[in-house]
Amino acid sequence: MTILRTPDARFDDLVDYPFVPNYVELEEEGTGESIRMHYVREGPVDGPVVLLLHGEPSWSYLYRHMIPPLAAAGCSVIAPDLVGFGRSDKLTGRSAYTYTKHVAWTASALFTHLGLEKVTLFCQDWGGLIGLRLVAEHRERFQAVLASNTALPDGTAPISQAFLDWLEFSQNAPDLDVGAILQLGSSRTLTERELEAYRAPFPDERFMAGVRSFPALVPIQLDQAGAADNRAAWSALQGFHAPFLTLFGAEDSVTLGSELRMIREIPGAKSQSHRIVDAAHHFIQEDASAELVSSLLELVGLGSGQDV
């Protein structure tokens, strides 16, 4: 297994991202090697735990406008970089990444190393594909969920044409400009410094195997790897009675509509104020961070539901 580590200098002086890096070492069983996983931790250590899980091809930079107000309100905020993204280690070769490994890596970091409990989860994109599996498999560690622009596909439902187009492009395009992808999925215009920050983890194509692999790992067929595990997760989520809120972006053609199954099948979603957020695209954190923060603070009992 070849492990790449993005040079620290790539992360110097990023706009609106002053956070001190933290790391855990994840042992790869049977290899004698370990993978370093990065996370941001801000706010009081004894505050309500708010976990922010990003998707693809972003990293914890996506939460730069949400971390400070959540921490200032008294939350203990944790925002990891998934393996292959951000300041976390990158593995070479797309086959080094599997859905099962991503769930296991993230669970190890959050529960074995950080010991998180009483977690309020915010998840978007692959943050939901991983995060909702964690909720299903470790229900006792979660006290609330806010799911946004995500899904838990298991091969039983149609997939949007927008996702199928992204799948084809991600596997075959000779160059994936991460900054341009973030801009395409955001309603607001990102500055050049913001675009460069999104590109920072990936100096060249060698670092892109995680980005390239994710779309092909989404289990859109019944017999695809991960589909059976996700069907089991759906069964487990039918026993999740803690608050489960959905906020989806009105402009997100990739996932909009996926919230309906969550609302229908997860008991904790009943009587919640589910909303479709106007003018918000796939990367809703860029377009509606104040509304997301307000909803999270309300879930943890530190807010009134008003935008901050």
Image (cartoon, rainbow, N blue to C red):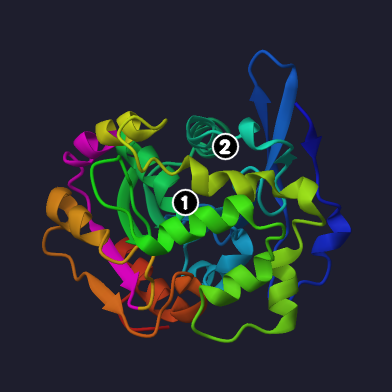
Q: Where does residue 274 sit, x and y in percent of width and height?
A: 22, 69
**How many numbered callouts?**
2
Q: Amino acid at mark 1?
A: Trp
Task: Answer yes or no: is residue 145 visible.
Answer: yes
Give the residue at mark 1: 126
Residue drawn at (24%, 39%), measured in percent from left and top? 234
Q: Tell me if residue 285 comes above or below residue 204 in the rendering.
A: below
Residues 271 and 303: in front is 271
Quadrant for the C terminus in the image: bottom left
Residue 205 shown left or right of residue 172 in the figure: right
Residue 159 shown left or right of residue 36 in the figure: left
Q: Where does residue 251 sit, x and y in percent of width and height?
A: 38, 78
Q: Is residue 244 magenta?
A: yes
Residue 64: quadrant of the picture: bottom right
Residues 98 and 246: in front is 98
Magenta stretch in the rendered image: 233-250
Give the residue at mark 2: 109
Q: Amino acid at mark 2?
A: Ala
